[in-house]
Amino acid sequence: MNLLNVDNGKWVRVKNFRGGHGIQRRLTQLGFLPGNRVRIIRSAPFHGPLLLEVEGREIVLGRGVAAHIIVEYI
């Protein structure tokens, strides 16, 4: 499943990425490494961005990019 399918407040683990080298490089720079834990803090209404906690940092990520992150529940 991708990050968009996760409910607010739930913790998941990054499994993999979909997409080319550019998206993978960008996500890696933001701390989305396979094995890292991620929590959805809040989803903005009207298909707005997601506020996430990744390795103790808060990150805002657009839904288009979030759709490329493959995760699993822990």
Image: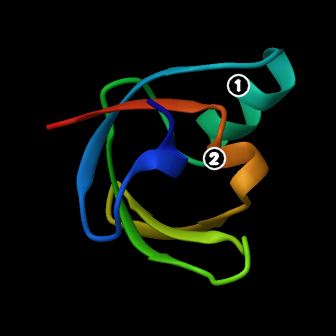
Q: Residue at x 70, y 56 (%)?
A: 63
- In the image, which disc is placed on residue 71? none
Left or right, 31 with reference to 62: left
Residue type marked 2: Ala
Which kind of residue does numbered mark 1 sit on? Gln
Q: Residues within 10 Å of mark 2 (few under 14, many from 20)?
A: some
User: What distance separates the C-alpha of mark 2 from that of mark 1?
Assistant: 12 Å
Q: Position of residue 46 (x, y in %)?
A: 73, 80
Q: Which residue is mark 1?
A: 24
> Dividing the picture into quarters, in which one does residue 53 lie?
bottom left
Depth check, mark 2 against mark 1: the one in front is: 2
Secondary structure beneath dot 2 equals helix
Q: Position of residue 15 (x, y in %)?
A: 39, 21
Q: Nearer the viewer, residue 57 or 61?
A: 61
Q: Residue furthest front?
A: 46
Dot 1: few (<14), some (14–19), or many (≥20) neighbours within 10 Å? Answer: some
Residue at image coords 77%, 48%: 64
| Residue that lies at the very extreme toward the left in this rendered image | 74
Q: Secondary structure at mark 1?
A: helix
Q: Is residue 63 placed above or below 49 in the rendered structure?
A: above
Question: Is 42 in front, or is 47?
Answer: 47
Horizontal side of residue 6 vs 11, given as left or right: right
Above or below: residue 40 compared with residue 5: below
Which residue lies under the disc numbered 2?
66
Q: In what quadrant of the picture does the N terminus appear?
A: top left
User: Going by the picture, which residue comes out furthest to the bottom?
Assistant: 45
Q: Position of residue 13 (x, y in %)?
A: 29, 35
Task: Name which of mark 2 and mark 1 comes first in the sequence.
Answer: 1
Colour theme: rainbow
**Which x, y percent locates residue 26?**
74, 38
- Above or below, 43 against 26 in this view is below
